[in-house]
Amino acid sequence: MTFAIERRHLPGEEPLELLSCVNGSGGGRAPLLFVHGAYVGAWCWAEYFLPWFAERGYEAHALSFRGHGKSGGHDRLHGFGLGDYVDDLEVAIQALPRPPVVIGHSMGALVVQKYLERGTGTLPAVVHVCPVPPFGLLPSTFHLAFFRPGLFSEINALASGHRASRTALAEALFSRSVESERIDRFYGRMQRESQRALMDMTIWNLPQLWRMQRVPALVLGAEHDALIAPSLAQSAASLLGAKYGLLDGMGHAVMLETAWERAAGAVLEWIERATM
């Protein structure tokens, strides 16, 4: 059975896009709320993950932060920081019928960490996929600058509002085995990221671990992740008190990879063990 994806806008400081794929036979399970990373929007989860989880009996939702996807605020993007994205996440959580399991990718995982630091509500569990670690982007930045300077230059161009090449996109987001058609399909949907949010992730607004609520947590790293190396993801798991898993043969954008279903399966298996 194929489940339709519905879009609605949540009221907030900016109208927030929420994509939902709902299976009416959820059986009392906690809903799932997927949170995107930098340069994309909720659409990245709608490609495969939302209908896949709905087919397995879950209410699956994906949020676009302000300035992303079809949320409002694109004209003021560079004024938004991580705190604003945490506000958006809180609005989305409160709009759901019960506290969700929140799955954050990359920047989105750091937003989830900041939400747990705020302590405004208890979540049943969280999943951090290829997360920006609690110590921020500096280690990744230095690694790219020294060992992959070409990619580092392209990412800086993207951060400055310019377009990166398809080659750089493939290297940054996907494994070595990704098809060119897949790269082309997503290239036109990438967008700018907030300069303020990038600075927050680097040094200015990192989570204070001693203030974070501790809930069941999983961290997933990806073997061929050029942006958040598996060693950094594993360090994040240790700091967050989370279980760690490695997705073999995958790049950073696991939800858009050719083998995306393997990543979805790893998330599902852990959620069912952690919440049942």
Image (spheres, rainbow, N blue to C red):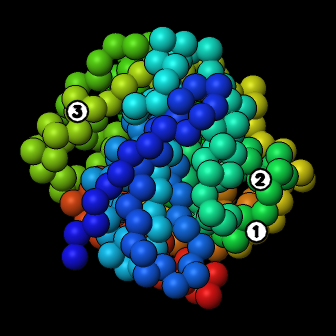
Residue 3 versus residue 110 in the image, above or below: below
- Observer-nearest residue: 210 or 21? 21
Q: Residue type at mark 3?
A: Tyr
Q: Is residue 232 visible?
A: no
Residue marked by disc 1: 215
Comparing labels 2 and 3, the label whose residue is closer to the camera: 2
Circle 3: element type = helix
Q: Are marks 2 and 1 in contact (CB under 8 Å)?
A: yes
Residue at the location (42% across, 75% down)?
24
Q: Position of residue 250 (x, y in %)?
A: 33, 60
Residue marked by disc 3: 187
Residue 14 versus residue 1 in the image, above or below: above
Residue at the location (66% across, 66% down)?
98
Circle 2: element type = helix
Q: Which quadrant of the figure has residue 57? A: bottom left
- Observer-nearest residue: 74 or 140? 74
Q: Which quadrant of the figure has residue 141? A: top right
